[in-house]
Image (spheres, helix red, strand yellow):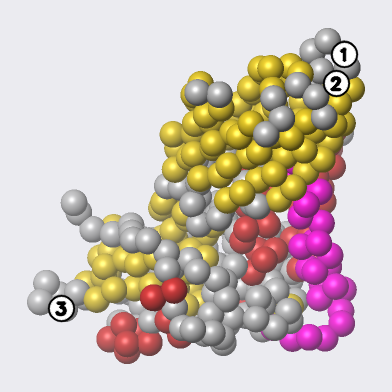
Amino acid sequence: MKPVLISWQDIVSKRLYVTGTTSSYEHFQDDEVLSATAKDNMGEGCVTVTWIQLNQQLLAVTGESKYIEQIEKSIYNHLLAAENPRTGCVSYYTSLMDQKPYTCNITCCQSSVPKGIAMIPYFTFGNIKNVPTLMVYEPASYRENVTTTDHKNINLSLQVDSNFPESGDANVTVTISQSAQFPVALRVPAWSGSFTATVGGKVYKGLPNQNLIINRSWKSGEKIKVSFQMPVQILTGGKSYPGQIAFQRGPQVLALDSSLNTEVLKAYSLESDQKLLTEKPVGESGAALLPTEWIGRQAYTANITGKTNTAKNQQLVFVPFADASQTGGTLKVWLPLKIADK
């Protein structure tokens, strides 16, 4: 385990892209060098899936939440980004700064990516220290045999109803073969805010990057109402993209898709020497900002101004990196933007 854990920490701290993948030209680069254009051959599909599998094995061995954090980051960003939701075609390398090169060829990575997506149900629920634990809040059904406090074996079913990752609201229905007392754990994501779970009139509060354990006498059909905030974080471009920023909402890194911002990009080319002003993406997700053929409902806006104070304010549209470029647009995760003074 020791060399594996040393390697894991080295990758996370020095070689991991914000979208949960690694490698360029199929090997690691120098410390914190994370160039992300198409010519950098970064984000190979096989690497993304193998990174997820490594974290799955470490989660199984240790039960530590830092591994599911990495799995979630990879799933909601680089893994799903590598398959076009419209066609099912896959990109061998998936850059953060160019059009995604989707093809329907059969290669190692173009088989690894669908395999990784098919494995997602195995990462989202399980027993941690013998406690049934819900780790991701996508709509799902889970079944598990559990041992009650008085050492009886019963059947447990959890039905998760939500629209995650659009919002942080979920209802979890607990169905059991007989009333009993036992614990159920809910993962509190490291990026979340104001995490609460309400059941039987009692409110439980969770802390980021920990599991919230609810140990009570359960009746079949009871519901756990889960609610947490999906804050927007500002990411910095580091050594490869100094002075540039990216946005992350909840687990999802956002991207600028040229096909959704045609008019703005005619006025502002967003070259690296520009100093543009913007605020955090705000506003509700919705189809109104997206073309009718678009797969996915998430879109967020930010106001942008030009180099001079007289420039007309315009609006940028951001979508999750996983959704971007599905209609052939060029995407950018790293942008030469400066956060506006409040």
Range covered by the magenta-colored residues: 102-125
Q: Which residue is mark 1?
A: 151
248 to the left or right of 68: left
What is the quadrant of residue 150 in the picture? top right
Q: Of the residues tagged 3 and 1, which is closer to the observer? A: 1
Q: CA distance from mark 2 to mark 1?
A: 5 Å
Q: How far from the left and from the top, in percent, is residue 307?
A: 20, 74
Whether residue 68 appears in this view of the structure is no
In the rendered image, residue 189, in percent from the top left (x then y), is placed at 57, 39
**Which percent across, then down, holds residue 329?**
52, 85
Vertical position of residue 12 compared to residue 180: above or below: below
Q: Nearer the viewer, residue 206 or 226?
A: 226
Q: Which mark is residue 147?
A: 2
Q: Amino acid at mark 2?
A: Thr
- Specify whether 206 is left or right of 76: left
Residue at the spot x=73%, y=79% of the render? 88
In the rendered image, residue 88 lying in the magenta stretch gets the answer no
Q: Is residue 110 above or below residue 246?
A: below
Residue 118: within the magenta? yes
Of the pair 97 and 286, the residue shown nearer to us: 286
Residue at (87% x, 82% y) in the render: 106
**Front position among marks 3 and 2:** 2
Q: Which residue corresponds to mark 3?
A: 311
Circle 2/circle 1 CB separation < 8 Å: yes
- Helix, strand, or loop for circle 1? loop
Question: Of label 3 and label 1, which has the lower sequence position?
Answer: 1
Measure the alpha-carbon separation of dots 3 and 2. Answer: 65 Å
Given the image, on which type of amino acid does mark 3 rest? Ala
Q: Position of residue 235 (x, y in %)?
A: 45, 54
The image quadrant where one finds the N terminus is top right
SS category of the residue bearing label 3: loop
Q: Name the residue type under label 1.
A: His
